[in-house]
Every structure is written in structure tokens, then in C-alpha cells.
Amino acid sequence: MFYRENGQFKASYRADLALFPVAQDRWFMLGLLGISLVAMPWLASDYLFRAVLIPFLILSLAAIGLNILVGYCGQISLGTGAFMAVGAYAAYNLQVRIEGMPLLLALLGGGAAATAVGVLFGLPSLRIRGLYLAVATLAAQFFIDWFTNRVKWVTNDSSSGSVSVQTLQAFGVHFDTPAQKYVLCLVLVMVFALLAKNLVRGAVGREWMAMRDMDVAAAVIGIRPVYAKLTAFAVSSFIVGVAGALWGFVHLGAWEPAAFGIDKSFQLLFMIIIGGLGSISGAFFGAAFIVLLPLLLNHVPHWLGVPISTGTASHLEHLIFGALIVFFLIVEPHGLARLWSTVRQKLRVWPFPY
């Protein structure tokens, strides 16, 4: 009843291939963006910004980058935390060593540095794949961890090994309050999500998906494996590097190498598995699940009057993550995004079952 397409005619290919061809989807997205940009900065509390909204946006951006590599191109990566670390430390060094470096240029510079490292460690994908490629990207995680811990130049000769960001400023605007930081993250996530969505819908995205489905057949029909795989590593690493810079600059403010350890790589991999491989919206579903589950495990038992310790909540979190990963791999490999797509399809034909 509320999701019918009666009277919605497509008079051109452009209209038929639009990002949101159904009017209800367009209105829903406009309403969601309006609430996020206009209402949320005024209504949400500082705790909601710091604990939920800002981590959700940054992790969504990192999951988008990882999903391009794993979900769309089929190249398994366990080094996402390393690429986030490269983006964070590169942006930090750009701001520290270049006087007057704008914030946005530092963030993009961190993404560019992560791109170079990602392409370098993506070279083995030209010869190996599957589990062997996962081990190669895992080597990137260990190498970057060692590099950031041992090379003092990376941390500007910090004795403790930790670095901190003093001020956030772009175009003469200081991002001091949690609401301002939230708006900064939201705008960047919107831009990168739109670019990624259009990229995977174009010729480059079709090459990535062809390599994912059957690389030998893709090479036979004229797709260059070198170009397809390395562009996937480059785009993915750039987005992940920008997300790492935002994680360090906006969310943490001060961090050490352990902030981008291997647990961060596995966390992002869990996000795209639960949210949905090969789906931009799946990155947001997975990030929302990862961010909200610990909070629910900590607060819901207390609301219900059931005492539960922090350690027990942490163990339950890992247990639920593992169970859900197994569940989605068996029952619905495409994750929450496919479930949402199924619900939308049912609404389009309701009350008919077909």
C-alpha cells in the first residue's frame, strides 16, 4: 500500500538507471538526510555523538572501503587496520610537519598514503588469491604495527609512542564540539558513499565483479586482471585511509599504534559479513550492528533488572558475533542488506505474494 510504483513511469534510460528509481526510496533518503543533517545536531546529546553516531559514521566509511575490495572484487583482506593506521599517521605527519596544512588536505593525504601502501601489498594478488592473499594482507598488518612502534619519525619522536591532535579546522571553521565533528564526518561519509555507489555501478565496478565471480573468464573477455585488482586495492585503501585519519583525528583525538591493531581488521571484516558483502548499504547495516550491540548488551540487562558484569557482556558480544557470522554465512550470505532488500521487494507487491 505504501510502497507501490503505480503511476511511476520511466521515460528515459537515465530515469530507469537512477540511483533511487522508486519515488518512495528517494523521499525516504531525503528525509533521512534531513534528519541527519538538520535535526540530529540539535537533538542528540554529546554522549550519543561520541559513543554512537561518530563511531558509526567512521566505521561505515571504513567498511565501504573494505567492501569494495572483498565484496565487489573478491580479494580477501585482513590488513584493513594497517591501512587505517597509515591514513591516520600520514595525516598526522602532514599536519605536524607542514605549517598551515588544511584539515581536509591532511585527511586526503592520509588516504593517498594508504593508497600507495595498499597497492604495494596488493601486488601479490596478481599471483595468489584466497587464503594465500589473506595471509599476504595479514603480513601488511604485522609490518605496519612494527613500523609504527619502532620508527620514531612516524610519531614525531614521541617518547610514549602516542600522538595527539590539538585542533580541527577546515575553511576557517573550528570543529570543537561533538556536533560539529559529527557534521564533518557525516558530510565526508555522504560524499564517499555516493562516489563508491556510482563507481560500483559503472564499468570499473563491473570489472571488479567479473574478477570476483570468475577471474579466468573475465580475462578471456578482455578484462585486465592487473588493472582491475590494483584499482580495487587503490580505491579501497584510499577510503579506508581517510576513515583511519577520521578515527584518529575526530573520534580518538590521541592514539597509539594499538588503536589500529589486528582486532580492528577483524572487526571491519565482521561488519561487511553481517551487513552484506557486495553492498554499499551493507556497510552501514554492519557498522550499526557492531556499534549498537555492545551498548545494548551493557544497558538492556540493567533496564530489565538483570545484573551482568562488563566481562560477561564482552564475552557475550564475541559469542553473538561468532554465532551471527556462522548464521549469515549459512542462511543469508549477503547479510542484513539482502534481508532489507527482500522486505522492500515484499512491500512492492503486497498484498500479493509474488
Image: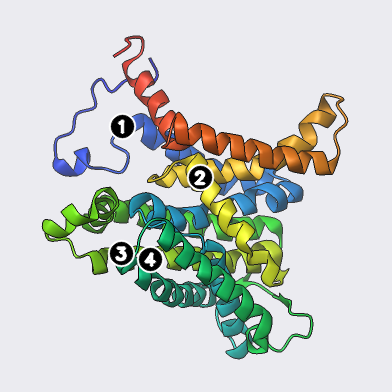
Q: Residue 47's spot in the image, x, y percent?
A: 76, 49
**Could you tell me which quadrant the C terminus lies in?**
top left
Q: Quadrant of residue 129?
A: bottom left
Q: Is residue 326 above or below residue 143?
A: above
- Report the mark closest to the observer, 3 or 1: 3
In the displayed structure image, the side of residue 24 where residue 141 appears, left or right: right
* Residue 233 circle label: 4
Q: What's the mark number on residue 22?
A: 1
Mark 3 or mark 2, which is nearer the start of the sequence?
A: 3
Mark 2 near mark 4, Cβ–Cβ under 8 Å? no
Which residue is more in the foreground, 32 or 207?
207
The answer for how far apart the CA atoms under marks 3 and 1 are is 33 Å
Report which residue position mark 2 lands on. Answer: 284
Seen at 25% across and 20% down, the residue is 6
Amino acid at circle 3? Lys
Q: Secondary structure at mark 4?
A: helix
Residue kind at label 4, given as amino acid type: Phe
Q: Which tag, 3 or 1, sits closer to the chain's start?
A: 1
Of badges 1 and 4, nearer the viewer stands 4
Q: Residues within 10 Å of mark 4 (few under 14, many from 20)?
A: many
Per the model, the C-alpha gap separating discs 4 and 3 is 6 Å
Q: 341 left or right of 223?
A: right
SS category of the residue bearing label 2? helix
**Element under disc 3:** helix
Q: Which residue is mark 3?
A: 229
Q: Do residues under tags 2 and 1 come within 8 Å of each other at their CB atoms?
A: no
Q: Earlier in the sequence, mark 1 or mark 4?
A: 1
Which of the marked residues, 2 or 1, is nearer the chain's N terminus? Answer: 1
Mark 1 lies on a secondary structure that is: loop
User: In front: mark 2 or mark 1?
Assistant: 2
